Amino acid sequence: MQTDTKQPFSSQDHILNVVLLLIGLLVALPILIALLTSFKVPKEVVTYPPQMFPTEWTTENYVTAWNSNPFGRFLVNSFIQTGLITLGQVVFSVLAAFAFSSLRFPGRDVMFYFILGSLMIPFELTVIPNVRLINGWGWGNTYQGLVVPFMASAFGVFMLRQFFLSVPKELHEAAVIDGASNWWYLWHVMVPLSRGGIGAFSIFAFLSAYNQYFWPLVITNDVEMRTTQIGIRFFLVNVERGADWGAVMAATIIVSAPTLLAFFVAQKQLVRGIAMTGLKG
């Protein structure tokens, strides 16, 4: 006879669940406030004391956010920039991680330590050399200027190398004995077995690229090449009537929607990637 081995929830478990729920609500509160504010009429946005829920719902803020600036163009620029950066970082990180985890060549460990050392260099320290290099190539105000400096990721190489090291080396040895090339083994064995890690890093790369503000600000001068993060700033620059906070919140919700959608779609891989990163070094 089989017995039920499930343990009932204890009082400590219920307390922990309540605490976690409160923390989750606290983290989600700013997003909820922004969402509700985006549906308020202007007079309710500045009402004191502030009200959580609007008494008069309106979608005019979204129309204003979309039409006040070329917001559609901003989104297109962000999607192109983010997509190319994410694709480049994933491909190059997979190739480099495989080389550092499964291949043997002179100077491998030294090169890997140099890559890890590059993580210690602040991005602000490399801005001026990168700007001069990109402008010297004539890539200012272009997608190349937005994308190329971020096509490789030292963090991605490190993270995926940790996943690749968790794959038994006997699989590689068996594939070599059977006559498989390193290229075949990478794409037919290593990549499928590391989908969780690659998916998690893809989310990290997507969020990092999509939320960039400083680099697009300094490398682009044309409004047609601006990204959504800079586009939101345009709503704050209105001398005649001040900031239209309802439109600002609407624009913020529009900009945040792709990142929230990406998280909900790939949250299992993201959590699994965070849990497994660094298991083996």
Image (tube, rainbow, N blue to C red):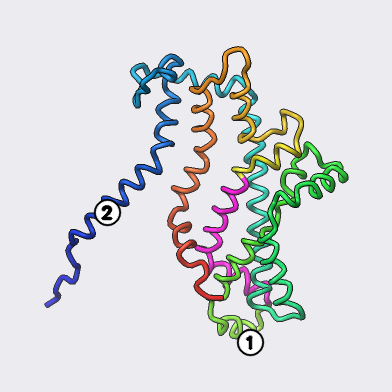
Query: Percent x, y for residue 245?
Result: 50, 23
- Image-quadrant location for residue 184: bottom right
The residue at the point 67 percent across, 48 percent down is 84
- Give me the disc on residue 17: 2
Please tell me how crowded label 1 is: few (under 14), some (14-19), or many (20+) other residues with Cα within 10 Å: few
Q: Which residues are magenta?
A: 182-209
Query: Percent x, y for residue 268?
Result: 43, 57
Q: Secondary structure at mark 2?
A: helix
Q: Is residue 25 left or right of residue 252?
A: left
Taking the magenta stretch, the answer to whether it contains residue 158 is no
Q: Where 38 falls versus 202 (above or below)?
A: above
User: Label 2 sits on what residue type?
Assistant: Asn
- Give me the disc on residue 177: 1
Q: The N terminus is located in which quarter?
A: bottom left
The residue at the point 43 percent across, 36 percent down is 31
Query: Percent x, y for residue 228?
Result: 61, 34
Q: Where 230 falls versus 166 (above or below)?
A: above
Q: Is residue 113 left or right of residue 199?
A: right
Q: The C terminus is located in which quarter?
A: bottom right
